Amino acid sequence: MGRRPLELKHPKLHSHVVDFAALPALPRVDDVFIALGTTIKVAGSQAAFRAVDFDSVVALASAARSFGATHLGVVSAMGAGLRSPVFYNRVKGEMEQAVSALGYESVVIARPSMLDGDRESLNQAARPAERIGLAVMALLRPVTPVNLRAISAADVALSLVKAVKSRKRGTRILLSGELQRH
C-alpha cells in the first residue's frame, strides 16, 4: 500500500494506492512492514509532514493489527526521540511510541542514517544538499562511525525483514550500524 503507484513490477508484488486516512479492509497477514515517510519540505508544512510520518504510519499499523498482524517492522529515523528538540525526530519518536503500544508480539524499529540511493527512480524529489552530503560521506566512509554512515534502502529493507522474521518478542530498535549489510 502506498500513496502513489510503484514503478517496480514483479509477479508477487501487488501495489495498492490508498488514502491512509480512510484505509480499506486489509487481508489477514502475520507480518507488516512500513517504510512510509516524507520530508517537511516535500510535505509543505509540519502538519502535512505529521499527517504522513505519524498519522498514516500509525493508522496502517493499527489497521494491520486489527486484521491479525502480529509482527511489525517500521522504518523511523536516526535521532528519533520524544524529547528531541528537532520536530522531525520528535514526530518519529512519537510514532515509535504509538506503534509499540498497539499490542504486536514484536515491533522492530529501523533507525537508518542518511539513505543512499537513486531518488529519481524512486519517484521522489531530487535533493541537491542530500546528494552533496552523500558524496562527502562516501569520501569519509573509512573513518565514519558505522552508525553515521549512509546506508542503502535495500540494506535497511533486508535487515528489517531478517529482524522481523527472527520472531523475537518485544520492541527492538536497530541502529544504522546494525542495518549495514556490508
Image: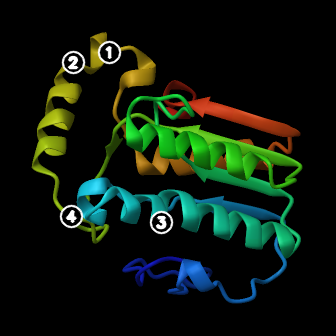
Tell me where residue 5 appears, x and y as whole percent. Answer: 41, 84
Sequence-first disc among 2 and 4: 4
User: Vertical placement of 63 versus 159: above or below?
Assistant: below
Q: Nearer the viewer, residue 60 or 115?
A: 60
Does residue 159 appear in the picture of this structure? no
Task: List the single residue furthest toward the top.
Answer: 143
Residue bearing mark 3? 51
Few, some or many C-alpha atoms within 10 Å of disc 3 (few <14, some 14-19, many ≥20)?
Answer: some
Which label is found at residue 116? none
Does residue 109 appear in the picture of this structure? yes
Which label is found at residue 140? 2
The amino acid type, in three-letter code, at marker 3 is: Ala
Q: Are marks 2 and 4 in contact (CB under 8 Å)?
A: no
Q: Nearer the viewer, residue 79 or 47?
A: 47
Which label is found at residue 144? 1
Q: Nearer the viewer, residue 131 or 61?
A: 61
Tell me where residue 163 appears, x and y as whole percent. Answer: 72, 42
Residue bearing mark 4? 125
